[in-house]
Structure formats: structure tokens, C-alpha cells
Image (spheres, rainbow, N blue to C red):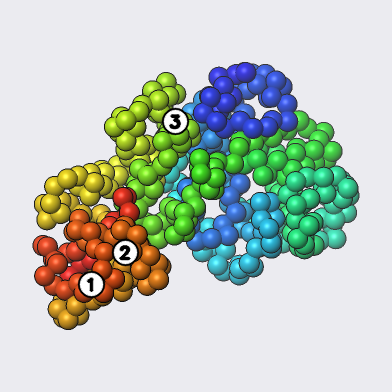
Amino acid sequence: MTEALETLAERGFLAQCTDIDELSARMDEGPVTFYVGIDPTGASLHIGHIVPLYALAHLARAGHNPIVLMGAGTARIGDPSGKSEMRKMITVEEIDANVVHIRAQVEKFLSAAGVTPTIVNNADWLADLNYIAFLRDIGRHFSVNRMLTFEAYRIRMETGLSFLEFNYQLLQSYDFLQLYSQHGVTLQIGGDDQWGNIVAGADLIRRVEGGQAYGLTFPLIMTADGKKMGKTESGSIFLDPEMVTPYEMFQYWRNMPDQDVEKFLLTFTFLPTDECRRLGAMTGSGINDAKETLAFEATALIHGKAAAEHARTTSRAAFGSGAQGAADTSAMPSVEVDSDRLADGIGVLELFAMTDLCSSRSEARRLVEQGGARINEVQVTDIEQSIDSSWAKDGEIVLRAGKKRFFRIVVK
């Protein structure tokens, strides 16, 4: 394989390819233009969504020409791939607002990775399509029988697949055709759940233009405990700092299972491959240093080095053995509580339920009863315990749930 494809394979970005030998030979001849599609169905990407952007950056660094497709057109339908039910429909205005936010996130991340892509929007050619002409010119090239063999549609046939969603593959294939015609795109990359859509697009280019195009997918990233990348019990790890703070993101990476460290260093950083493997092979206290490296590198790419450094300083203070009063806790997630309210005392269950550490008083009760609740590093075991202003140190109270989750109560 050519060096660019070897890099993808070494770092875990290669699951399937329509013709890897031919694609490799084509890359050896000179730069190829390729694209990644992003549907703006939410206000922010989460870290699972940016796996394709890492793959894009590796190919761009190898000299190939990247295009990011903002799917404001396809988002009006919703991709059924990997979904057990139809996506909630959102308005065109919401989609357009999402495009603005997500485009800024994409540009910031890729700029940190040293890449400047061309960014296009498929609403430019999808929004005003003539449906009859589209069916006549494009739809005739698709076999329903073949479409139903692809996993995304086959799975949804068991739970219900709307005709609206059934059109998605035609539209994504048409995107590939338009980018081939307008920008010379000959390669589409994406997650393995996109395999059917990507293959269909390459086939459409062959049928309509007589051209050769390729598809490459990478595995869907899962943690060692079987969770989808970027998903936690408390929700997704979004890139928007108003939704998930840099500290919370840092802690997400810092708390990764030991067995995931090497894989995620390879996937979510641009550190050399040998360095990723060296760090991932560490044991004992060394693996914690490797996790901190992962957390810093990944957070810095998304939020900048200053925010990552601040998060690292706060994390070290929180997990150190010193007194909380001397620690820099300012990056911790927090909530303000009025001093008058605290003077009267707040029940420990209510206090924990006010934070992201517990979603309810009943969850807080279980935490206290199981010995996992600490306030200023003092274990609290009495569910009737009242927390008043005497617990505040330097105007704050630091709560901890379990070993690794912290929250700050700021007394105003």
C-alpha cells in the first residue's frame, strides 16, 4: 500500500475499501481529491463524530486534497444508518443554524491539525432538485433489491423504514456524483456504517459518467466496555464548550480504561505511531501518565492548548493528595449557591442532586449509602447530613462521586 493508506491502517482507520490496490496505485500517481460528509442534525459534533476528520487530516498531511461536505440538504431527511428508528425531523432554519456552529468546529479542529479543507454544502444542489427529473436521471440506476442487502436498510426493515429515509442513499450517492463532476473527487471516506451509501455513490459515478471512484471506511470506534465512542451515562461528549467544558472532556479521556489507551492515542492524536504504542504499553503509574498525554493531546486539538493546560492543572490538583484550599479547581464543572441558602444548610442528597454527579436524590442516596460520596475529601455516609457554610473553603465546596468525578459548589 501507498504510505498514506499504510498510515490509516496502522492507526486503525481502515475497515473496507472498494479496491485498495487500485486506490493505492492511483495515490502513487499523484494527489487524489477526497471527501467526508457531515450531516448537521445537531447543534454540535461530539467526539465520536470527528473520527472521520482525523482520517481526513492524515490523508491531507500525506498530500491529498480534502473536501468537507456539510449535509444541510441530506439532513432534511436523515440518515437511517446505525439508527433503530427514524430521526426526529428538524426545521430548515435549525439545520442552517447547526451548519454555522458545526462548520466553525470543523475549521477550528482541522486548523489545529494543520489542515485547511475546501468546505461545500449539499443544499446547493439538493434543495431545489426537480423530483421527477431526479427519479428519471438518477433513480433508474438503483436496484431496490440491492439496496435492501446493505446492513443499514436490512436492519431497519425489521423495525420500520420510512420511504423518506429510503431516499437517503440516492441523495448521498448524488452528492458523490456532484463532487466528482464539480471538484474531481474520486474518493469518499467514512465510518463503516456508511459502506452501502459509499459503494452506491461510486457505482453511480461509473454508470453516469463512466468514471472510476473509490470508497474507504474505518471501524466504528467502541470503548473496551462496549460503549459507543463519545457516549457516557451522563450524555455525549460534545465539542461545544458550553455543553461540555474542556475540563469535562479532559476527564473523559483521562478516565479511559487501560486497554483503550494505545488505540485511542493512535486514533485521537497525531503523536507518532511508535510513541502511541510505547505509551499504550505502560503499566502501573505509567499508564496514568499515558492517559494524561491522551487527554491533553485530544483536548488541545478541540479546545486549544491553553484550555487543555488549564484542564490538566485542575485535574492534577483534584487527584493530588493536597488540601483542596490550595488547589486550582477553577476548570471543574460548577454551580453557584447563594450564601444565605447555604447558611440554613442543604441536605447532602439535595446538594449532590444539584450537580452533574447525580441525576436525582435517589441516585445521590445510593452514592452515599455505597460510600462513594465525598465533600472536600471527607467521606459522607449519613443520608441526613446537612451541608452548611462551615463546609466552604475559599468560597467553594468540592464534591466527589466515586474515584474520578468532581464538581464544585461556588458560594456567592
Please tell me how crowded label 3 is: few (under 14), some (14-19), or many (20+) other residues with Cα within 10 Å. Answer: many
The residue at 33%/54% (across/down) is 402
Quarter of the rendering containing residue 216: top right
Q: Specify the quadrant of the image occupied by residue 358.
A: bottom left
Identify the residue at horizontal 62%, vertical 41% (top origin).
Answer: 191
The first of marks 2 and 3 along the sequence is: 3
Name the amino acid, label 2.
Val
Q: Which amino acid does the dot numbered 1 rest on?
A: Gln
N-terminal of the two: label 1 or label 3?
3
Q: Nearer the viewer, mark 2 or mark 3?
A: 2
Q: Please report contact status of discs 1 and 3: CB closer than 8 Å, yes or no.
A: no
Q: Where residue 176 appears, x then y in whole percent? A: 70, 43
| Residue 355 seen in the current view | no
Mark 2 surroundings: few (<14), some (14-19) or many (≥20) residues within 10 A: many
198 to 328, vertically: above or below = above
Q: Quadrant of the C terminus?
A: bottom left
Reading the chain from its start, which is encountered first: label 1 or label 2?
A: 2
The answer to which of 79 and 68 lies nearer the viewer is 79
Marks 1,2: beta carbons within 8 A: yes
Which residue is disc 3 drawn over?
262
Q: Look at the image and tell me whether residue 40 can be seen.
A: yes
Secondary-structure class at tag 2: helix
Residue at label 2? 368
- The answer to whether mark 2 and mark 3 are in CB contact below 8 A is no
Where is residue 370? Give x, y as percent. Answer: 35, 59
Distance from label 1 to label 2 (Cα)?
10 Å
Residue on which the image places disc 1: 385
Q: Secondary structure under badge 3?
A: helix
Q: Residue 44: where, in percent of width, then height?
A: 48, 57
Which percent across, then down, holds residue 235? Answer: 47, 59
> What residue is drawn where x is 83% and y is 40%?
208
